[in-house]
Image: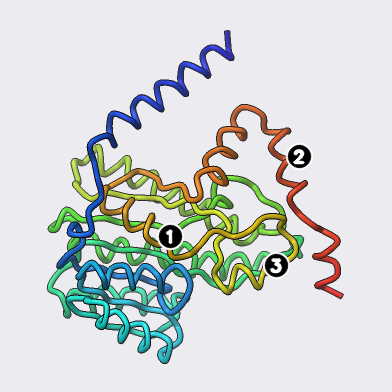
Amino acid sequence: MGLLKKALIALIGILLAVYFYSGKEFKPEMLKGKRVIVTGASSGIGEQMAYHLGKMGSHILITARTEEKLKKVVERCLKLGAASAYYIPGSMDNMTFARQVVHEAKSLFGGLDMLILNHIGYSYFNFFDGDVDHIRKLLEINFLSYATMTVEALPMLKESEGNIVVVSSVAGKLGLPLTVPYSTTKFALDGFFSSLRMEFYHQKVNVSVTLCVISYIDTDTAVNTVARVINHLPAPKEECALEIIKGGALRQREVYYQYHATKIPLLLRDWAPDFLDYLLLKNYNIEELNKKSE
């Protein structure tokens, strides 16, 4: 009887998803003239999102730590057709800077339509070393700055009935090995933004919250960090960036990319958690991790 109940709940979920998202088709024109902040945009997925938005004719404000990289990204965005493109360098461990980015968007654009939160701080890929202070510092960058920017941007987003897009990870839904500090911060994002979404529903605030659950992507940082340890190929960052933008524009609740590497493991988590743990651990070459640390 318990199994039947679970099957019925899953079926209802699928039918509701089909109902809400059928007939909604993404068109690049949806982003034309939109005012967008993209954080963590000097490389990787954030950089690719900036280029996609440039092609779509958006007004873009990007941020990251390295000014020289940001300059090059802005130059390319303008060549691709961005309505306007600006950058502001700084570190997201500083909440004053996080607020400053939002204020800069208001000064440049007079408002905001989409806030894409994508930046992350450095963390190791290894067994947890017991350093709780590292988790605290990582929470400031990977979580508290997200919350800070969201609070600061909300008046503008309420006015435009805009979108909050949060780039998270499958590590924010599943407890994966070798990622304890990183996974902690991503779980925090899920709790904060999922709860905030529910409050928006109750308060009739027409601002969408899209949580993006992404898998192993071929960014330089990810590949250099987990190379030889994980037994599958990374997904392309260009496609991942586009799927994130699409999900935000369509006001989707969650985006799963790649679907087979994110959504299916989540189904197994609820139905066969021990089997999922077995599959996940089989996907790691711990011997290679030991070699890297020698």
Residue 49, label in figure: none
Query: Splitting the image into 4 quarters, where does residue 127 fall?
Result: bottom right
Q: Is residue 255 above or below residue 16?
A: below
Locate the N terminus by quadrant. top right
Query: 239 above or below 221?
Result: above
Q: Residue 278 has which mark? A: 2
Determine which residue is flagged by label 3: 227
Considering only order in the chain, which callout, 1 or 2, is on the residue closer to the N terminus? 1
Question: On the image, numbered disc 1 is attached to which residue?
Answer: 239
Decide: is 293 above or below 172: below
Q: Pick the residue in front: 192 or 34.
A: 34
- What whole-number distance in Å separates the C-alpha atoms at marks 2 and 1? 29 Å
Of mark 3 and mark 1, the one earlier in the sequence is 3
Residue 249 image offset from top left, x and y in percent = 26, 53
Q: CA distance from mark 2 to mark 3?
A: 21 Å
Residue at position x 26%, y 73% from top?
54
